[in-house]
Image (cartoon, grey):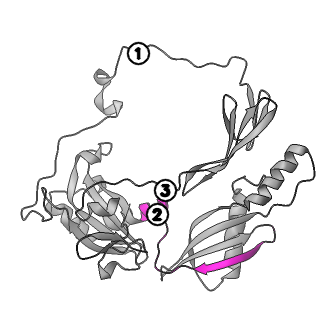
Amino acid sequence: MTLHPFDPLSAEEIRLSSRVIRDAKPSQDFIFNSITHREPPKKLVLTYLAAKQDGSALPIVPRESFVVLIERGTGDVYEAVVDLQAQVLKSWLHVPGVQPTLTPEDCFEAERIALADEVVKKECAQLGIVDMSLVVADPWFVQNFMASSTMYAMAESIGYTGVPAHENKRLVQLFMFVRNSPTDNHYAHPLDFVTIVDLIAGHVTEIERLPAGEGFGVREIRPRVPKTEHNYDPDLLGSAFLRKDLKPLQVLSPEGPSFKVDGNAVEWQKFEFRLRQVCGNVRFQIDSFNYREGLVLHNLTYKDGDKVRPLLYRAALSEMAVPYGDPRPPFNRKT
């Protein structure tokens, strides 16, 4: 099957990418942080789209993957480009002083390490918690802040907080909570400390008490864990909390849908497109959905009479910042 230049990587292409790198670097052991589609040059894709619209011969478009890896043991980060058609490693770059994004596996591993740690268990016991199965460790990347004389400034590497012991480490801070029962909303019961885990070393590096009140200091006497529950699950609240004034809503297509989907290709009325959402006369492709940007729109066009007008070649959110607004550690590292 011939893939469209905007198609995401197939499962086989992902496996091929990892196999090519392992064969090229047999002496190194890696964690594959991400494997994603490396978009081909825009000029070549525009030629492809024009040829497809005209029905002429399609040009060959390179098919490549972009891979981010972490070396086990050292924590060194590498970026690689794999030529999927030639099945060779096209480029290899060591990127010092950085840490890539957290993956779900990283989060699960950090929580496992934290909850199994004896110091964490001791901290919980001091708060009257003996059943560790009810303790929840909520993972956040230790963001990159470098201490200056009066402020925190962004540093080059994620994981550097102005503390020399944190430099060049893959750190996760876990905000701690406890539940009254296995299905209880744990955010109603915060504990007064965070646990910092080094994912490369595989152990807890430190325990940090949360600041109290409006200042930067911590309480000498540890506070009690809040016991009041704040649940929203209907099974926990009971039927008395459910609204009874809503009328039934039904969405039916008794003759079936008015569109056809074949992989990433969609046919709808007189339109044929590749996973495009259609709003009026506006069409756009959403073939790309990657781990960093989420939804990516390609080839946004507008049908203006007999003409198809290109509006956007590519559109995505390059980043999103959520300022929590608390300058005190560890909250400032959540932004």
- The x and y percentages for residue 75 are 48, 79
Marks 2,3: beta carbons within 8 A: no
Q: Is 106 contained in the magenta span?
A: yes
Distance of label 2 from label 3 (alpha carbons): 15 Å
Q: Secondary structure at mark 1?
A: loop
Q: Where 8 sits versus 31, above or below?
A: above
Q: Secondary structure at mark 2?
A: loop
Which residue range is magenta in the image? Answer: 85-109
Which amino acid, by three-letter code, is at mark 2?
Answer: Leu
Q: Residue at x 67, y 19 (%)?
A: 253
Distance of label 1 from label 3 (alpha carbons): 39 Å
Label disc, if present, on residue 102 of the rendered structure: 2
> Can residue 288 be seen from the camera position used here?
no
Q: Which residue is mark 1?
A: 246
Query: Mark 1 or mark 3, which is nearer to you?
Result: 3
> Can residue 204 be seen from the camera position used here?
yes
Q: Is 183 contained in the magenta span?
A: no
